[in-house]
């Protein structure tokens, strides 16, 4: 008989051969690729590759001089860039399904309290990433475009290259999407015990300085873009501290309750 003081491991007996893990991983990757392919095909049919590029370019085109259009300096850019944009959009559309496949792959190897910890983080990080991308598209790029046109000399006619614009916008999307993950990073650091809530509060000043340094390095050299990144990061840091305080308290209470039930079993 087992010692009642030694709770049974809930994952005992669930181990699977390494090859079976590889097979499952391959199957899930195939499902993801099929999902991306289906989304790509549907987007190519409607609204169409050209319409998606027009949508991506709209925040800057709206602030260019009347009659000005983007240019293509590469022979295949008019085809290649819309193709890349459609593929990127297809991946973003199926991103929740991709994350669900990742979750389904790793969940069997997690304890109950770990599942309660990981799943909310996956969902919240996905939502925050999309919020960051939307913030960049609807607020940052239009404001930056207005700023550039306001300070551009009258003798210069702005005609951005479509390939450079796509790379520029994609970089901004990634920067703002990752920057909006600050609350998740704060919660994870506090939950795993690397820092305490009090240490996070004391480091507030250092984070503010670091946020403005990061904004100055990764964004275009204009005040609008830098403030648009640094200020939300500071606000999200404060929200992360509040979320970490509540999240750590709840998850630890749940673990203690689960451990108590196992011990008395």
Image (spheres, grey):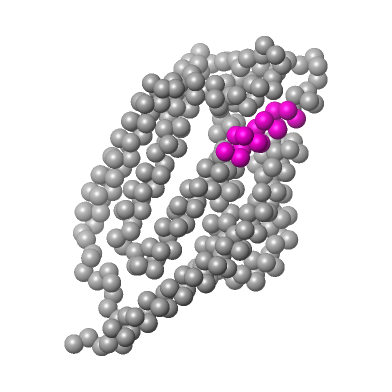
Residue 213 at what x, y percent from top left? Answer: 71, 49
Does the image show residue 108? yes
Q: Quadrant of the N terminus?
A: bottom left
Q: Kindly identify the residue that appears in the image at 67 percent across and 39 percent down.
A: 219
Residue 21 at what x, y percent from top left? Answer: 25, 54
Q: Kindly identify the residue that appears in the image at 63 percent across and 54 percent down.
A: 236
User: Can you say whether 115 is above or below 2 in the image?
Assistant: above
Say if the magenta span includes residue 142. yes
Residue 17 at what x, y percent from top left? Answer: 21, 59
User: Can you say whether 9 is above or below 85 in the image?
Assistant: below
The residue most toward the left is 1
Residue 249 at what x, y percent from top left? Answer: 52, 72
**Total label count?**
0
Q: Which region is colored magenta? A: 134-147
Q: Kindly identify the residue that appears in the image at 67 percent across and 30 percent down.
A: 142
User: Seen in the image, is 60 located left or right of residue 27?
Assistant: right
Q: Quadrant of the C terminus?
A: bottom left
Q: Kindly identify the residue that appears in the image at 69 percent across and 23 percent down.
A: 63
Q: What secondary structure characterizes most of the magenta part?
A: helix
User: Can you say whether 116 is above or below 177 in the image?
Assistant: below
Does the image show residue 217? no
Say if the magenta span includes residue 129. no
Q: Quadrant of residue 196?
A: bottom right
The residue most toward the top is 67
Q: Quadrant of residue 143?
A: top right
User: Can you say whether 52 is above or below 178 in the image?
Assistant: above
User: Seen in the image, is 4 located left or right of residue 184?
Assistant: left
């Amino acid at each position: 008989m087992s010692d009642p003081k030694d709770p049974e491991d809930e994952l005992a007996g669930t181990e699977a051969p390494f090859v079976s893990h590889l097979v499952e991983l391959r199957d899930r990757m195939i499902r993801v690729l099929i999902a991306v392919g289906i989304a790509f095909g549907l987007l190519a049919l409607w609204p169409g590759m050209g319409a998606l590029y027009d949508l991506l370019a709209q925040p800057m085109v709206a602030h260019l001089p009347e009659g000005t259009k983007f240019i293509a300096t590469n022979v295949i850019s008019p085809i290649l860039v819309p193709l890349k944009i459609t593929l990127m959009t297809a991946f973003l559309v199926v991103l929740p399904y991709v994350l669900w496949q990742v979750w389904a792959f790793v969940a069997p190897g997690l304890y109950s309290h770990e599942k309660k910890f990981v799943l909310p983080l996956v969902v919240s990080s996905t939502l925050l990433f999309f919020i960051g991308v939307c913030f960049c598209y609807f607020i940052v790029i239009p404001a930056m475009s207005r700023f550039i046109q306001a300070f551009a000399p009258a003798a210069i006619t702005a005609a951005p290259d479509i390939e450079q614009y796509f790379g520029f916008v994609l970089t901004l999307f990634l920067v703002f999407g990752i920057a909006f993950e600050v609350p998740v990073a704060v919660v994870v650091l506090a939950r795993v015990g690397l820092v305490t809530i009090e240490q996070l509060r004391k480091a507030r000043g250092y984070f503010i300085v670091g946020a403005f340094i990061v904004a100055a390095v990764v964004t275009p050299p204009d005040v609008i873009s830098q403030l648009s990144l640094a200020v939300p990061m500071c606000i999200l840091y404060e929200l992360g501290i509040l979320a970490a305080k509540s999240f750590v308290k709840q998850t630890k209470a749940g673990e203690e309750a689960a451990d108590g039930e196992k011990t008395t079993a």
